Structure formats: C-alpha cells, structure tokens
Amino acid sequence: MKLIVGLGNPGPKYQRTRHNVGFEVADRLAQRAGETRWKERFSGQTLDLRIGDVPCLVLKPLTFMNLSGRAVQAACRFYKLDPADVLVICDDFHLPLGKLRFRARGSAGGQKGLADILNSLGTQEVPRLRIGVGELPDRWDAADFVLSRFTQNEQPTIELALDRAADAVGDWARSGIEYCMNHYNAG
C-alpha cells in the first residue's frame, strides 16, 4: 500500500491558494478515479483508490499545514507503512511556477507541513513532490505569499502543473521515486 499525502489548509478561506496545491492534486486523483466519498479518518480526509495494481490511500490532513505530521503518523501507524511508501505533495516558493521536483529524502527546506511530517515520523527518508508556486516576490512575507491566490496570468501554468503532478503521482505509485526523479526533475 502507498500513502499519498496532499498538504494544504482546510476551509474556504484557503481554497485555491498557493499553499493548497497538495490538496488540489489529491482532488484531481479522486476525480480521475471517479471517487467522491472522502472519509474522515486520521485527523484528515481519506480516499481509498487503486493506481494500476497498487492500493493507495490519499490523505488530506485537516490539522492545518503546520501540524500535518499528526495525520500522517496516524495513517502510517495504522497501516504499518514504511516512510518510503509515503509521498508528500506540497508547495515550494523556491521553485519557478509550475516546476515539479521529486526528492527521496532530505530536509523540509522551510516547508512547515513537511517539517512536521519529518519530525513526527522521526526521519528525513520521506519521498516528496514539490510543486513550484512561483518565487517569493521582493518585500513579501512568505506566509502572505503562500496564502495568496494565483493571478489570472499564472492560472494556465499552475493548472497544467497540477495535472502533470497527478500524472506524476501515478508514476510514483507504479514505478517508484527513482523513476520520477529521472523523469520529472529534468528541465
């Protein structure tokens, strides 16, 4: 089994913000699978689906971004999952808008939801897919920027990136992190 974690913040106030791209990818996976029955479990919303022959649990933590580790740890403990079987999908303002970057391990790079997950699981050996939400503009506070919405000019680029990210998650479930790093990180 694979655990796919889309990070974001719950509630209408945060919908379609830069910080919620993980939720957006999770929703795209649900739409593609024709699933609409999210369940409340593990301090989040979950959805069981299959990607090819691989059973997957999609999780959207409802703990708010900075406490996402609680939900991920609960799901990992329940299913006895190794951290290598978890994929965290999150925003990254250090990447250009729409750029996808897979990593098998490493620090959180300032992403507080990812940091809480790494801390809760007690390891940095957690695969992640970072989605570029545009670089932090001069004189902007990082929190204000990630909680802002994409501009009309940015919409086509981010929509394409979110669809590509959903494709990439399927590739991760079927083919693994090394394949995805080689295929998606170039360019």
Image (cartoon, rainbow, N blue to C red):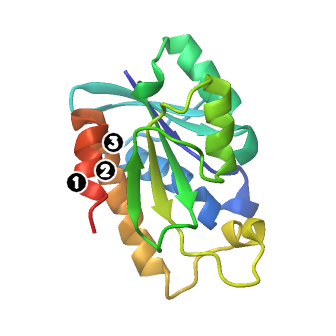
- Residue type (three-letter) at the residue carrying disc 2: Ala
Q: Residue at x 38, y 28 (%)?
A: 56
Q: Residue at x 51, y 56 (%)?
A: 24
The image quadrant of residue 138 is bottom right
- Residue type (three-letter) at the residue carrying disc 3: Ala
Quarter of the C terminus within the rendering? bottom left
Q: Callout 1 environment at 10 Å: few (<14), some (14 to 19), or many (20+)?
A: some
Q: Choose the circle earlier in sequence order: 1 or 2.
A: 2
Q: Choose the circle earlier in sequence order: 1 or 3.
A: 3
Whole-number angstrom distance, CA of label 1 to CA of label 2: 9 Å
Q: Are marks 1 and 2 in contact (CB under 8 Å)?
A: yes
- Residue type (three-letter) at the residue carrying disc 1: His
Q: Relative to 73, is 146 above or below?
A: below
Q: Callout 2 environment at 10 Å: few (<14), some (14 to 19), or many (20+)?
A: many
User: Considering depth in this image, is 182 or 13 the residue closer to the camera?
Assistant: 182
Say which residue label 2 marks: 168
Q: Secondary structure at mark 1?
A: helix
The image quadrant of residue 104 is top left
Say which residue label 1 marks: 183
> Can the viewer see residue 44?
no
Figure disc tally: 3
Q: Secondary structure at mark 3?
A: helix
Residue 127: x, y in percent?
44, 38
The image's mark for residue 66 is none
1 vs 3, front mark? 1
Say which residue label 3 marks: 33
Residue 66: x, y in percent?
74, 44
